[in-house]
Image (spheres, rainbow, N blue to C red):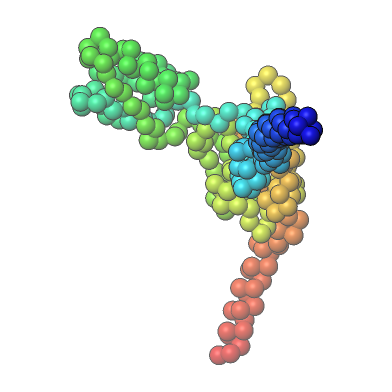
Amino acid sequence: MKKLTQLLLILCSFSLLQGGAQAQDFSGLQANGGQSNNNSNTTATSATTAANDTNTPSQEAKARAVIPSSMEPRPAFKLLAGELNSRYTLGPADVIMITVMRHPEVSGLYPINTEGKIQYEFVGDIVLAGMTKDEAAQLLVKKLQTYIINPEVTIKITEYNSKVVYVIGEVGAPGKIYMRGDTITVRDALLAANLPQLTAATDACTLFTPSAVSKVVPKKVNVYALLYEGDLKQNYTMKPGDTIYMPPTLWAKIARFLNPITQPLGSATGSAAAVAAL
């Protein structure tokens, strides 16, 4: 009996020890399980963030989504081959206003003579023909540095007289067109001449470019297509000295031919009617 009691005590002690070990293992598993859950949650959060980053557009994409396509920056415009620079170069008969800051004695209006020069105080004659107003200002700065410390020069063109084209024929104001650039288009020249009249044959206009070494070749211009149909192929570039001729229509020619004949007859008929009325 005593031995049986000792055996039972030994078995109980063994069971208690085994249960404690299992409890420690279970608590360890809980701790590890918590860490695993934390790691799993972190991994899940990272995956969610990555997914959101993938699905969320970038700042540039958001900006492009907000800005309409018409407001997006476009590539810079490039001049097509054959297009001419419309800058204005000085020439004979032009008049310029020269302003030198704090020095009115060398400021004023200066006409450019037939030699392309101006007569300038302290410096003498200066050739400005063929220069733009900015280039002329830089030249005057160099000339005046001998007499003035750091001269500030500005030039304004007050009269454009050196470059002209001619518009003749059936237009509102035929004659010279003074150019504000080294070139002018046919459309701008016609607008400056107050447009074609009703008697003009607008589909048979001719552009002449003078030449001293060869025969002048006329160029046909369909002014009707240019002005009223928007055909810019007809908008030729004119240079100084060019002439554009707007001919009359056939009916206008006939009316002008018959006018000297019909006018006396009309006057005579009116006089006869007046006599008969008396």
Q: Residue 135 at x, y = what percent?
A: 42, 20
Relative depth, front residue between 127 and 99 = 99
Q: Position of residue 9 (x, y in %)?
A: 73, 32
Q: In this rendering, does residue 248 appear at all?
A: no
Foreground of the two, 123 or 16: 16
Taking 61 as reference, is 264 above or below it?
A: below
113 relative to 272 in the view: left or right: left
Q: Give the side of residue 172 with respect to residue 135, left or right.
A: right
Q: Residue at image x 59%, y 79%?
A: 271
Residue at 61% over, 46% down: 67
The image quarter in which residue 15 lies = top right
Q: Look at 48% across and 20% down and name the residue there.
A: 130
Q: Vertical placement of 28 versus 72: above or below?
A: above
Count the marks: how many?
0
- Compared to 273, does 95 lie above or below? above
Residue 202 is situated, as x and y percent measured from the top left of the image, at 71, 51
From the image, which quarter does the C terminus lie in?
bottom right
Where is residue 252 drawn, in percent x and y?
70, 58
Identify the image quadrant of residue 75.
top right
- Residue ranking furthest to the bottom: 278
Q: Looking at this rendering, what residue extends furthest in the top direction?
A: 146
Q: Is residue 191 visible?
A: yes
Q: Quadrant of the N terminus?
A: top right
Q: Picture quarter containing residue 258?
A: bottom right
Name the outermost residue toward the front. 1
